[in-house]
Amino acid sequence: MFVKPFRHLRSWLIAAALGGMSWSAAAEAQAGEDPVEIMERAFKRPDGDHAVKKVKLTMKDKAGHERQRELQMLDLDFNEGTRRLIFFEAPADVRNVGLLTYDYDTGQKDDDQWLYLPSLRRSTRILSNKKSDAFMGSDFSYSDMTKDDPSQYELELREASVKVGDEECWVIEERPKNEKYKEETGYVKKLVWVSKSKLLTVQVKGWLTQGQKLKYIKLEDLQQVDGIWTAMRLTARTVQNDTMLSETVLSVLEAGYGKSGVTAEQFTQGRLERGL
């Protein structure tokens, strides 16, 4: 259940969160209680390669009105990080809208993102100061679709042992080291709950830079898919003055890793602009 009210994806969160290799209890002992070491281990955790996912987004506004979207996602590791290609499949009015991301492991290099809108018939690069904007009206931002580099944060261990469901967690506070990263991510600070057994983020509470809002995400229904820990459900809520403004539920309908059909040729602007 949500902690008052409750919040959040940067490896998909969504990224931080849709996958993680199976880890033994030794991971907890190795990481100890140094927040930098914990977050570095979580950041470097294998999260699956040549990945294919089908996802449903359910978006709810303050009045309770719902909209649904179906997406296809492809992930591929490369020398500097991870590439991700997302296409909207349904409904018809958003079909072929796409997002291409080059998520670099080092925070010293800005991630590259391109958005394709069929109505414009071309893709446009998303500027750094726009990456905190909402992704297609959801509670996830463009920045949430990439992984947070722990070297870009001041880190503090706030709780050494807290339970989230069945997961024993560390609670770590993250504060961006500079204004540029704060503007790009859209967060003044975050509290991150990291599973000790899986080194996987299972919960985040974020203080947004705009509107005195909070953003909460919870990652649930953790399953091993092809040996990779995968959160099959992510719920993100945006809250202001204890009132929920909106909610997005991301449900993974299908997931697979090690798929030979996922190749580097698919992660280009040209492929993005061809649609499904």
Image (cartoon, rainbow, N blue to C red):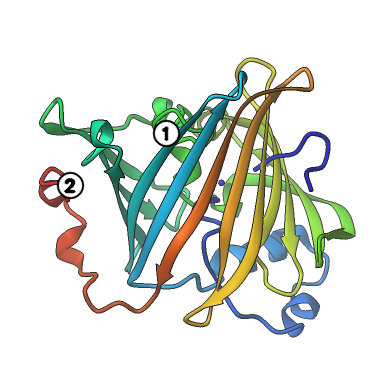
Q: Residue at x 35, y 49 (%)?
A: 71
* Left or right of 197, for residue 89: left
Identify which residue, 112 or 16, lies in the foreground.
16
Q: Residues within 10 Å of mark 2 (few under 14, many from 20)?
A: many
Q: Percent position (x, y) of residue 154?
A: 70, 44
Q: Percent position (x, y) of residue 209?
A: 62, 23
* Left or right of 236, for residue 55: left
Residue 13 has which mark? none
* Left or right of 193, for residue 236: left
Q: Residue at x 60, y 53 (%)?
A: 150
Q: Check disc 1 and report its element: helix, strand or loop.
A: loop
- CB under 8 Å between callouts 1 and 2? no
Which image quarter: residue 241? top right
Residue 135 has which mark? 1
Identify which residue, 181 or 19, lies in the foreground.
19
Residue type beneath disc 2: Leu
Which image quarter: residue 26? bottom right
Q: Check disc 2 and report its element: helix, strand or loop.
A: helix
Identify which residue, 96 or 176, lies in the foreground.
96
Q: Residue at x 44, y 49 (%)?
A: 56
The residue beneath circle 2 is 272
Q: Is residue 50 visible?
A: yes
